[in-house]
Image (cartoon, rainbow, N blue to C red):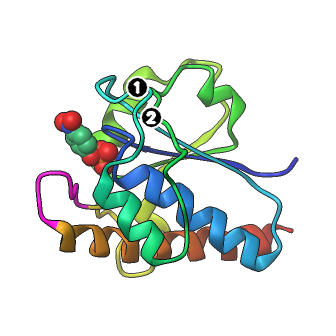
Amino acid sequence: MSASILFICLGNICRSPLAEAALRAEAERAGLDVVVDSAGTGDWHIGSPPDKRAQAVALRHGIDISGYRGRQVTAEDFRRFTHIFALDGENLKNLRQIRPVDGTAELRLLMDLVTGREGSGITDPYFGDEAGFDVTWDDVTQAAKAIVARLQEQN
Ligand code: 4NP
């Protein structure tokens, strides 16, 4: 079964769309066929494009995410995806609460895959300045590379 990966943050307009974009790019570079998506635990930004600052940092790395749209995670996601990665500990806690009993997806904290960053969350850049989005991009890129390495090991 090919891997399908869902990234979850709070609003689905800053961190998880960037994680989605970074993994799409790293998987393409590695020639890996993987389904990638993102969603939020919250419902404020359903149907919204990513935050302008998230769009800008992705574009600085050659990726246009203006067409992404926010959505809220559903119970069905736990059956549809093979892996669900929470961007921070609060998101993980919320996901554990809504996980259906027949959910099959592996549920983990994203940075647990990055050596030296285990147990840490990706800081929410939403209330900060533009530079915070560069930090987010670096973090999600490290995680995306780790996911690709893991998928290549499994292939
Ligand atoms: P995200 O950032 O979870 O990385 O998308 C946030 C975006 C919006 C809000 C919170 C976090 N908000 O409260 O509207």
Q: Residue at x 31, y 49 (%)?
A: 51
Dot 1 amino acid type: Ile
- Main SS of the magenta part reads loop
Residue 46 at x, y percent in the picture: 40, 25
Q: Is residue 22 visible?
A: yes
> Closer to the N terminus: mark 2 or mark 1?
1
Q: Which mark is residue 70?
A: 2
Distance from disc 2 to disc 1, alpha carbons, whole Å, reads 5 Å
Residue 10 at x, y percent in the picture: 31, 39
- Viewer-proximal residue, 6 or 125? 125
Q: In which quadrant of the rendered view does residue 153 lie?
A: bottom right
In the picture, the quarter occupied by the C terminus is: bottom right
Asked if residue 125 is among those painted magenta in the image, a careful observer would answer: yes
Left or right side of 115 for 33: right
Dot 2: few (<14), some (14–19), or many (≥20) neighbours within 10 Å?
A: many
Asked if residue 56 is among those painted magenta in the image, a careful observer would answer: no
Left or right side of 26 for 1: right
Looking at the rendering, the stretch of residues picked out in magenta corresponds to: 123-129
Which image quarter has ligand 1? top left
Residue 36 at x, y percent in the picture: 65, 50
Dot 1: few (<14), some (14–19), or many (≥20) neighbours within 10 Å?
A: some
Q: Is the shortest distance between ligand 1 and the CB of mark 2 under 8 Å? A: yes
Q: Is the shortest distance between ligand 1 and the CB of mark 1 under 8 Å? A: no
Residue 54 at x, y percent in the picture: 35, 59
Please, what secondary structure does the residue beneath circle 1 have? loop
- Circles 2 and 1: CB atoms closer than 8 Å: yes
Q: Is 116 placed above or below 10 here?
A: below
Q: Is 94 placed above or below 85 here?
A: above
- Viewer-proximal residue, 17 or 1? 17
Please, what secondary structure does the residue beneath circle 2 have? loop
Dot 2 amino acid type: Gly
Q: Which mark is residue 46?
A: 1
